[in-house]
Amino acid sequence: MECGVVATHLKVCPGEAVQVEGKILPGCKGFEVNLGKNCENLVLHFNPRFDCKGDANTIVCNSRRDGVWEDEERDTHFPFEQDSNFKVSFTFDTSEIKVKLEDGHEIPFPNRLGLDVLEYVAVEGDFKIQVLRFA
């Protein structure tokens, strides 16, 4: 069962964070958190995959420029569990996005688009969002 939320016309500036909390649904294949200017221009596509698109227990990060996906980066640190609550924080900077997982693991991802403000956040997939916080 896919769930989702989209927020547009935001103004998340460097040094600020987007925090997402929710429940990973039973039988989850994967979910994603997208940050950027709009759905065609994503500075970060954060995609934990339990069993999806040929990946198992892998976090895939990518960016999208004018609707075209760039090079994927993978992280095999995978603290997610199906049918459990989870939170993740994304700290925005002009050079990178720092992803901080609930267990303290951090994933730095470069700001490939050179954005100076985040205007778009979308959460999709087998993840029931409970909190979307800007700090």
Image (cartoon, helix red, strand yellow):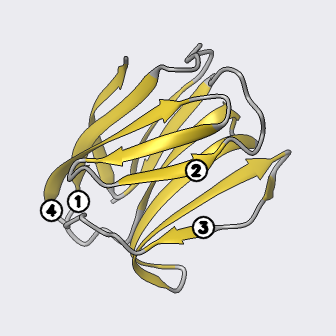
Q: Which residue is at a point 43% across and 25% down the rendered structure image?
A: 17
Q: Residue 53 occupies which quadrant of the picture?
A: bottom right
Task: Tell me residue 24's x, y (percent).
Answer: 24, 56
Are there few (<14), some (14-19), or many (20+) residues within 10 Å of tag 3? few
Q: CA distance from mark 3 to mark 2?
A: 9 Å
Q: Quadrant of the C terminus?
A: top left
Q: Nearer the viewer, mark 4 or mark 2?
A: 2
Q: Which residue is mark 2?
A: 109
Q: Nearer the viewer, residue 107 or 130?
A: 107
Q: What's the mark number on residue 73?
A: 3
As helix, strand or loop, the secondary structure at mark 4 comes to loop
Q: CA distance from mark 1 to mark 2?
A: 26 Å
- Picture layout, residue 86 above or below residue 129: below
Dot 1 falls on a residue whose secondary structure is: loop
Location of residue 6 in the rendering, given as x and y in whole percent from the top left corner: 51, 32
**Mark 4 and mark 1: span between their CA atoms?**
5 Å
Residue 95 horizontal/vertical position (percent): 67, 36
Residue beneath disc 1: 25
Report, in whole angstroms, how far the alpha carbon at label 4 lies from the one at label 2: 27 Å
Mark 4 is on which residue type? Asp
Q: Are marks 4 and 3 in contact (CB under 8 Å)?
A: no
- Cα–Cα span, label 1 and label 3: 24 Å
Q: Callout 3, which amino acid?
A: Glu
What amino acid does circle 2 point to?
A: Phe
Tell whether label 3 touches label 1 (CB within 8 Å).
Answer: no
Q: Secondary structure at mark 3?
A: strand
Q: Is residue 29 left or right of residue 35?
A: left
Task: Specify which label sits upstream in the sequence, 4 or 2.
Answer: 4
Residue 83 marker = 4
Q: Residue at x 45, y 54 (%)?
A: 107
Mark closest to the chain's N terminus, 4 or 1: 1
Q: Is residue 21 above or below residue 33?
A: above
